[in-house]
Image (cartoon, rainbow, N blue to C red):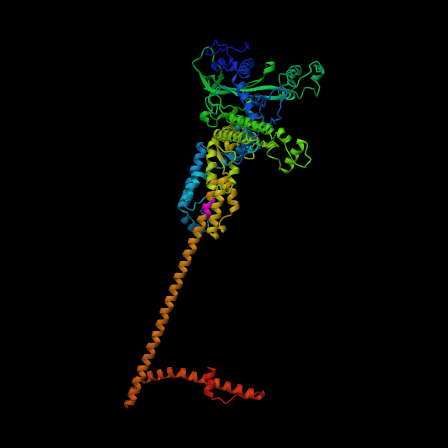
Amino acid sequence: MADYPSNTNNSPSTSTSPLKDFQLSQNVKDKREKSYGKALSAEIWGKINGVSSYFWLRNNRFRKNRLIANGKFDMSVFMDRLDMNGKFNYVNINWKAIQLPGTVISRMVGRWKKRTEKIDVTATDPVSIGAKNEAADMAEYYFDNKESLQELQEASGVPMIPQGQFVAEDKDELDSWKTEFNRVPEEIGYDLACNNVLQKNGWFDVLKEKILHDSAETGLVCTYTWMDDEGQIHVDWIKPENSFSSYSEYPDFRDTTWRGHIKSMKISELRAKYGKEFGGDLTEEQLWVIAGNSKDWQYYDKIRFMQEWNVTVMRPYDEWNIDVMCLELRSLDIEGYTVTKTKKNGSTIIRKGKPEKLDENQEYIEEKKWNIYKGVYIPVVDTMLEWGIKKNMIRPQDPKEIGDAEFSYSFYMYENYDMRNVAIPEKIEEPIEQMILARLKIQQLVAKMAPAGYAIDVDALQELDLGLANMSKPMDVQKIHEQTGRLYYRGRDAEGNKIPPPITELANAGFLPQMQALIQLYQFHYQVLKDELGEDPNLPQAASQPRVTAGNVQEAISLTNDTTDHYYDAYKHVMEDTGRKVACLLNRSVSYGAKAYRELLKEDQVKGRVFQTRIQMLPDDKEMAIFEAQIQEAIGTNKDLILYLNPNKLLRIAKENMQLGELYFHNAMKRYLRTQQEINAQNSENNAKVQQASYEAKVKGDNELEDKKNQAKERQILLSGAFDLLKAGVEIPASLQPVMEGVIVNMSLPLMVENAQMQQGVQQMQGQQQQEQMQGMQPQENVSVQEQLQQTA
């Protein structure tokens, strides 16, 4: 460990710690040396591998938590407590532990799995913000002028509103669109790509369940995000027991300087990645030495190294496993550049390093930036497989932060205090142990319980006189009592002395109080478990009881979620950090021309763009049930609403985006209400027109009737005056004679028409009578023509 390079630049150090020298050194060239990495790795391995180290103690606690969560307790402890660890036990007890911790954790994980989430992407670069502002201005313009534009479009026949342009129905819809749904196409494509990466790696199904169990059982969750040479992004699950890092006071380990994990690799994998025939440094003999330190190696004398194995395709130790330590260190490096401006043509030449003496046309510039160094180390053979600045390093997308660098590891430990916290198994360990002990004592009590028996007085049985019955043996009397429950005996002997009852029943009166006490003890510790856990494991079962109201159940579930949400929040936080790193690598992959995600994003869509990510929670079953109830209630109240929305489509939209589903629902309601208002207005207008027409027809009819009355009255006056003149012997003036003739004609013409109709009717009657007589029918009785006309009328 003493062969690592010394600190030779700016900050000399006499420390014997390679890790400390690495942080103080500014000589990037020395830091990249493999010997430096080997010394660093060996020091870190010494920190994490000691039997009294933090990681050793932490992993012991993790292992115990895992055993408790899977119902595996060390039952020998309870044997000691019950004094039943001897060679011979007089009570046969089932020493199997209760499975309550596994049930509790499985229920919690199952409840968390029902929650769904996705990565939401927002573009924050000036180009994207400008495009969104322009889209918002255009939407506001078309909203303010949509009536005028529609009139111009109808008048000219030329489309005035571009196809696909969003036009809000009202001000609320416009504001909602600008704040929530105004997105550029690059955001949508980036959103799909990030979620596709996580979904492809199994983070929305299988790995989600594993990391939720890690959160509940160990209190630590870990991921590893990296990009291969083809530009493909991978997100690996890291078992918490295999992870390690420097000290941190934050739950997300933001202040750590090194992180890593232990993984198991097969010898064939080591050969494919680091073997000489594949461009590495390991010879086959070195691989054999490594395999000799594997856990799979057993008989050294049966498998020896042979030269033939250098060219053999299959080797007997290829599938043996070896533990490899992968680590990353974060370091602030300073790289110097000498900028030379030529005197001849004024061109600029940039070279790394600083010359001993600067000329007048030279300038030395130092650049500070964070780098991530990656190392792969085999501790058992003290061999460094890989060391140097990490390829495809995760750097922020914002050019202002391009000098920063992120670890590939994402860690999160809720309630971090001194690098420890309390997971569920550790929290309920004490009440679970006491419940196990109570159950064992119940088994012991039941096993040792004496049945109901009898106290038999043999002397009294000998004095028993049964008369002529042949019961000479006391056992015969006992059998009679046991079979019939009756016993006849004389209470006094021949001398008159009182004889006690020969058989007295003995009830086991001490068993029931002891059993009830043990049951109460079990229930007490179960209540302690609920208090420690913060929730009732039997809440779903209690919710199914008819006496429990829905409001109480929802309140209890809400309180339960408030108590246990920090376990699920660990998954959310680590996935949000992982999503941010996926976005950084995605930008790098597409920008540098990789074809892995070319179907979703193009190079020009990400170059110069800055995308921020956050985790967005999708609606759970409770929210979906409330939303569906609102839809059904609205449709039940307004039957015609079904013509304006598709409930199934609305629920599908809400599952992916509740805000978009609510907007779709409100828009459908607005269209329905607006149509109803238009129909009501049209009906009111039609009713008003009908009433107006009816009124005008009535007025017209009244006027015509009044005119007829006036005309009749005028005629009456004229005729009365004319008859008065004739009666008086006065001749009608010549000027009035035409008028009188017209009046007489007008009055006589209807009478003439009526007389003609009556005559025609009489003729028809006579023709019918003649026809009936000709057919031989009996003629009708003689009726006067006037009566027949009346009947006909």
172 or 72, nearer to the observer: 72
Total marks shown come to 0
- The range drawn in magenta is 664-668
Q: Within the magenta stretch, is there residue 455?
A: no
355 or 327, nearer to the observer: 327
Q: Position of residue 457 (x, y in %)?
A: 61, 29
- Seen in the picture, residue 233 relative to 679 is either above or below; the reply is above
Q: Within the magenta stretch, is there residue 665?
A: yes
Please identify the quadrant where the N terminus is shown.
Answer: top right
* Res. 28 in view: yes
Residue farthest along the front direction in this orientation: 495
Q: Position of residue 593 (x, y in %)?
A: 55, 29
Residue farthest along the bottom direction in this orientation: 729
647 or 609, nearer to the observer: 647
Question: On the image, which quarter does residue 502 sit in?
Answer: top right
Q: Position of residue 319 (x, y in %)?
A: 66, 22
